[in-house]
Amino acid sequence: MSLDSFHHIDLIVESGDDPPLARRFIAVNHRGWLPEDEALLTLQAIIKFTTYLRRAADQVGPGQPASLELVTVEEPPDTLLRWLSDRGIECTTIVGDARAPSVGRPSGYADDGHGRPALDPLVEASARCCAEEHDLPWPPTPASMAALDAVIDARRAEAGFGPADESPDLEDGELLVLAGSYAGECARLRWGGSWRYEPQQGTPLVLATGAGEGVKVNFHGKVDKYLCHGPDDSVAALVAALAQHVEEA
């Protein structure tokens, strides 16, 4: 159980004797909050709980959403705690054999002016981590996207899938965040823009770029599709298509 699994609920707790039962969806972060992991884990938590919020409404029914909780082994960043609280999500920290309401600790990254995480520095940090972990060029350029595709291909091959194989159950929440951030930062550094939270998207981190930031691209969602469907969902091809659209506009 960790924050890097987006399509599964870690724990579902039901209470009450008669239907409809009250349900509680719980995510567990057993990894802690080391400074070098904060950007990755914060983005994973945002993606995971956005999915939980949708599933809470879908599974329990209108007017009876499940309650949500993050259980963590260390105090989370105060910016993430504010983001969770704004959405009615409880956060508790394991203390000995019990849990206590989380109080948070200072984040190593800037907030958005309202106490919530600012996405731009978190995504940039995750992109740099991707470059370091997978020996990719920094800064990212359209020319380095083929190497990023190769990283995703290698992950699929490691799981036993060939280029033409469908792998709908393959999930790698760490690679999804790191690779999506690397590709997105390539676009942001080249054409400008900013990262936005759009919960209606399947993966809710979206880069708004191009003239007036009028072009929105879901790079993290593209990586998820590549993991599941293979090279037909190439990230390099997405960046090339975006270049044509933005530069010829």
Image: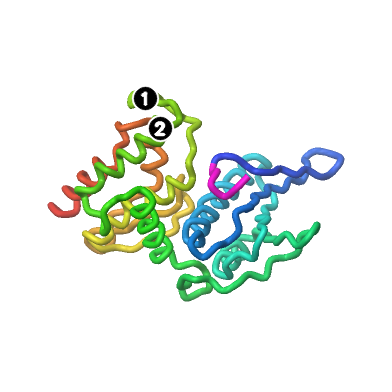
Where in the figure is residue 46, as x and y percent of width and height? 52, 56
Q: Is residue 157 above or below residue 178?
A: above
Q: Quadrant of residue 58?
A: top right
Indicate the secondary structure of the residue bearing disc 2. helix
Left or right, 131 with reference to 240? right
Q: Nearer the viewer, residue 219 or 16?
A: 219
Report if the CB atoms under discs 2 and 1 are less than 8 Å apart: yes
Main secondary structure of the magenta stretch: loop
- Whether 67 is among the magenta residues is no
Q: Nearer the viewer, residue 106 or 232?
A: 106
C-alpha separation, residue under disc 2 versus residue under disc 1? 7 Å
Q: Measured from the top left, where is residue 33 in percent x and y?
A: 57, 61
Way the structure is coloured: rainbow
What is the span of residues highlighted in magenta in the rendered image?
1-6
- Identify which amino acid the numbered label 2 is placed on: Arg
Q: Which residue is mark 2?
A: 156
Which amino acid, mark 1?
Gly
